[in-house]
Amino acid sequence: MAKTIHVGTLISGGGTNLQAIIDACSRGSIDAKICFTGSDTPGIKGLERAQRSGIDTFVVDYTKIIRSCKHGIEDADLPPDFDLGEILEKQQLVTPDTPAGTLGGASSDGSMERIAFFLKSRAMAEKKLLDHILAHDIDLLVLAGFMRVLTPYFIDRINTVSGRYKIMNIHPALLPSFPGTDGYGDTFRYGCKVGGCTVHFVDYGEDTGPIIGQRAFEIEAGDTLEDVKRKGLEREWELYPACIQAFADAR
């Protein structure tokens, strides 16, 4: 048996993947203990799931933080260790062609100003996440439906050893196909006959990190988008605990 690893979790919604991981821990089918569950959104069902299982929870309200940033960001507002030049050099999330609404900046701003706004405002939120996360000695951070991209500012403070990944994410498509927020929808609209889900490590890009595991399912004639999502979620609930166990086994 592997040693019991200490896991932190981040969520944004109902937390069905979180529940699958909680259940696997409770059954003893994975060698893991969940230390905390954090969210970017208050009042979501996933936080209730964690609390019912006696897991510590916290919220960093991204929407509130980003809204406040639109009045202007001063240097004093930023984390003391934030280096915009360094983050710009590393980040692979946004380019000057990225639409303004995607970045959360004002459309009248120049492209570089919008990118800077995106990275600064997210770092302000990520610093608050890190204040909670780094208070725990975790082996692995699991994004269980966390709908915010993470910048190099955050990633470098979790992945502190070069080449050793400690942030795991699940994506609703068979990567590298259909990255982004609507993997099942993109798979269905493209007319694929096979769909699936992917667990991967997080790097500086969007859904570009090393793949840990995948599960596939057939999309049958007559299946609706809801059928595709249902089949996908059922595979996710099997795959995520299995990949966490693979991490615990150092595989």
Image (tube, rainbow, N blue to C red):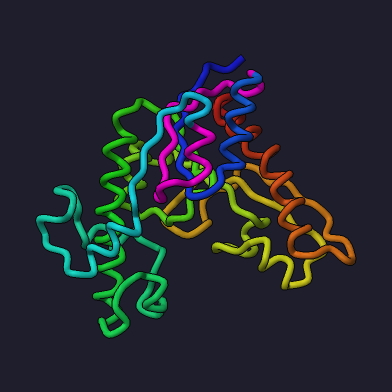
On-image quarter of the N terminus? top right
The image shows residue 231 at horizontal and vertical percentages of 76, 51
Choose between 121 and 163: the one closer to the eye: 121
Q: Give percent across and percent down for residue 102.
A: 41, 71
The quarter of the picture where the C terminus appears is: top right
Report the residue at 31% width, 66% height from top.
118
Q: Position of residue 162 (x, y in %)?
A: 37, 40
In this view, the residue farthest toward the right is 221
Q: Is residue 204 left or right of residue 126?
A: right
Left or right of 3 in this view: 26:
right
- Count of numbered tags: 0
In the depicted structure, whether residue 83 falls above or below residue 165:
below
Residue 182 vertical placement versus 99 (above, below): above
Task: State yes or no: residue 215 in magenta.
Answer: no
Kindly identify the residue that appears in the image at 14 percent across and 48 percent down. Answer: 80
Image quarter of residue 112: bottom left
Q: Is residue 141 above or below residue 29?
A: below
Could you tell me which residue is drawn at 48 percent across and 27 percent down?
A: 34
Tell me, yes or no, whether the highlighted magenta stretch contains residue 33.
yes
In this picture, which residue range is highlighted in magenta?
28-50
Camera-nearest residue between 62 and 8: 62
Q: Is residue 200 left or right of residue 92?
A: right
Farthest residue, direction bottom: 108
Q: Quadrant of residue 77?
A: bottom left
The foreground one among 177 and 44 is 44
Q: Nearer the viewer, residue 84 or 122?
A: 122
Q: Residue at x 67, y 44 (%)?
A: 236
Left or right, residue 51 beside residue 118? right
Q: Position of residue 20 (x, y in %)?
A: 63, 34
